[in-house]
Image (cartoon, grey):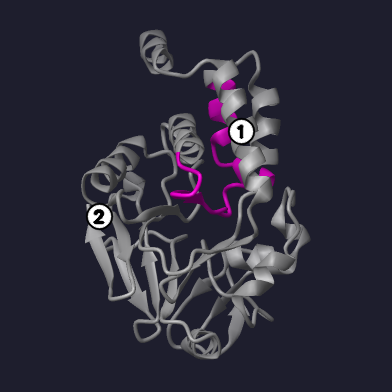
Amino acid sequence: MAENMSEELKGLPEVDEVKELIREVSEILEKEPQLLELENLNALVVGDLHGDYASLKEVLNLWSKNYREDHVLIFLGDYVDRGPNQIEVMVEVLRLKIESPQKVFLLRGNHETKSVSSTYGFREELSRKYPEVHEELYVAFIDMFSKLPYGVCTCGYLLIHGGLAQGFEQPEQLNDIPKSLIDPEDHELALQILWNDPVEYIEGFIPSPRGEGVYLYGPDVTKSFVERNNLKGIIRSHEPCAEGYEFLHEGLTLTIFTCREYSYPISIAVVNNEELKVVIL
């Protein structure tokens, strides 16, 4: 066990580097709106990673080889919790953001919150890998998470982590969510954007088994939102898919998932003005 721990810790960045990465990315995020309007930029879209560093590297290799020159890279959140390499995933995406702030965009997931990441593994991994400064690092990460934006509009699609929300009539309402919101339970729109799920065979919104203030919603909600805002559809993550991805609501909603922890295939989306394509990895 001790040998395994020693091997695990060898590749970790120094504490000072982690602190500097958090500081620099926080400054960048502070200046970004909660809705990133990218004016029809082609995009490679990444779903939940949950500490799956191997899958992240696979995505980055694909992006660098085939897409980097003419596609931005968008992450839909849930970098942390559950998986074995949460710190490594976070450090990698922070480095990317600093290197290419106008090419790499990081959205907030429901796990980039204090209430969830303190329970599902991120806080524990910090204490194990950085035992002497884990609490200081955790506080810094939580503060940075609170600055992550909630959505992207590009090529006619709205990209979010979870789902559409009650009272959410247009994408620009995301800009009403305050920066530095540590836990979205304090804000109805933020909570639902991060937690809600689309389902078939219902109308409107019904309470979700995920918890209080969270909802499932039907095809009518998606259709109305897309038509009202002249969109092609919604791209989201938040749920593992048996086939690696899933189209719902007559093709208006695409769910992708990019973490192998659930033993399902994983996927990314490639979007431009001509098409939306799913790539199975």
Q: Earlier in the sequence, mark 2 or mark 1?
A: 1
Report how many numbered discs are placed on residues in the image: 2
Q: Is residue 210 visible?
A: no
The residue lying at 41 percent from left, 72 percent from top is: 155
In the figure, residue 217 lies in which quadrant? bottom right
Q: Percent from the top left, x then y, of residue 87?
A: 49, 30
75 within the magenta span: no
Residue 110: within the magenta?
yes
Q: Secondary structure at mark 2?
A: loop
Identify the amino acid type marked 1. Glu
Location of mark 2 (residue): 265
The quarter of the displayed image where residue 143 is located:
top right
Task: Report helix, strand or loop for mark 1.
Answer: helix
Which numbered marker is on residue 80? Answer: none
In the picture shown, does residue 216 fall above or below 54?
A: below
Look at 41% across and 10% down and name the residue there. 6
Q: Is residue 237 visible?
A: yes
Q: Which residues are magenta?
A: 100-128
Q: Mark 2: few, some, or many residues within 10 Å (few <14, many ≥20)? A: some
Badge 1 crowding class, 10 Å Cα cut-off, few under 14, some 14 to 19, many 20 or more, is some
Residue located at (50% from left, 88% from top): 202
State the quadrant of the N terminus: top left
Circle 2/circle 1 CB separation < 8 Å: no
| Residue 268 placement (x, y as % from top left) | 31, 57
Relative to 218, 131 lies left or right: right
- As drawn, the label of residue 24 is 1
Q: Name which residue lies at 42% across and 31% down.
A: 85
Q: Position of residue 181 (x, y in %)?
A: 74, 52
Compared to 167, does 105 lie above or below? above
